[in-house]
Image (tube, helix red, strand yellow):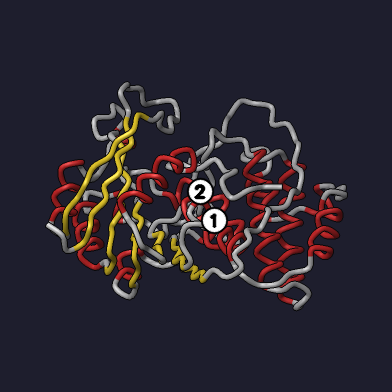
Amino acid sequence: MFNIENRRYVGNKFKLMNWIQSTMDQECPNCDSIFDVFAGTGAVSRCLLDRYNSFIINDFLYSNEAIYRGFFENSKYSKNKINELKTKYNSLDLNQNTYSNYVSNNYGNKFFSLHDALIIGYIRQDIEDLYTSNQLSSKEYYILLASLLYSADRIANTVGHYDAYIKNKLIRGGFVFDLISPLNVKNKKIQIFRKDSNELAKHIKCDIAFIDPPYNSRQYSRFYHVLETITKWDNPELYGTAMKPKEENMSEYCKSSAPKAFEDLIKSISAKYIVVTYNNTYSSKSSSSQNKITFEQIKQILDERGQTKLFEKPYRFFNAGKTDFSDHKEFLFITKVGQQ
């Protein structure tokens, strides 16, 4: 079964969570609620689940929202039904002439083998049909959809994201439909959003705002467009070699406007503590890896809200093959709001 952290995802903080969690325990006492502003994989909220009682989990990707609902939503579901469908999906024997679908037509022999693409598309449509005919609850729907996303991602013909697929390579089939392991969120208050973080922040009150925004020019909606399209299942027209839909959900944090967006967010937050992660890729040789917000800008903006402490840890960063520099560090800013 898949745990929530079992994804290839740029900026995943799971391996840093012991350090982040222990630092927050020391610096942010007597807190009960946390706002995971740019939740990404959801691994931060998952790792902090035992620490706090109330969680606001937000991200603007459709695929991430579906995954959060599969893992975090506190509602009943039938394990027997889910397992029966798992058995069905792992017994499929499809051929192109009969079962050609959107995934096989667009991503077959590119992001997936043709046979795997046939299966992925078939399962996605079946999940949708079962849900729209009221044969699945909302929780069951999102468990199955999240499970499909994780299963597809595991065998995708990529380097870990979907900005491009690996060319001139024999794509070996090997798709297996495995299930996610939903989290035990009994007695927890969980709110899940897919909203612009700057707008949502104006309406949220919490003890801790945890902020891990995108800092470079890599747009996550483009990096994970295949998973987005499979999630939305709206069959958009695709363009270019990488088979991408028209641009949508383009983040200001990946543009030159990032410092202004970050300043507006920090000013809007109503919290006792603001926790911000940052890494020192600003001097990267790769233009796509260069941060749009500098270390100094982050520090200055946070200082205006309160007393800010800085913590750092050496850490090996995500590398798609074009960036190479040493002494990489992960930084953690913790601001006690209103204290100077």
Labels 2 and 1 touching (C-beta < 8 A): yes
Quadrant including the C terminus = bottom left
Mark 2, residue position: 224
Instruction: State the image quarter where residue 60 is shown.
Output: bottom left
Q: Which mark is residue 204?
A: none
How many circles with numbers are drawn on the protein? 2
Where is residue 16 drawn, in percent x and y?
A: 43, 39
The residue positioned 34% from the left and 51% from the top of the image is 213
The residue positioned 32% from the left and 44% from the top of the image is 217
Q: Is residue 40 left or right of residue 276?
A: right
Q: Is residue 151 left or right of residue 280?
A: right
Q: Nearer the viewer, residue 126 or 281?
A: 281
Q: Nearer the viewer, residue 61 or 80?
A: 80
Residue type of the residue flagged with mark 2: Tyr
Residue type of the residue flagged with mark 1: Glu
Mark 1, residue position: 228
The residue positioned 39% from the left and 63% from the top of the image is 35
Where is residue 227 drawn, in percent x and y?
A: 57, 52
The residue positioned 79% from the left and 63% from the top of the image is 79
Where is residue 314 drawn, in percent x and y?
A: 35, 29
Q: Nearer the viewer, residue 23 or 227?
A: 23
Label 2 and label 1: CA atoms lie apart by: 6 Å
- The residue tagged with tag 2: helix, strand or loop? loop
Where is residue 17 drawn, in percent x and y?
A: 45, 43
- The residue tagged with tag 1: helix, strand or loop? helix
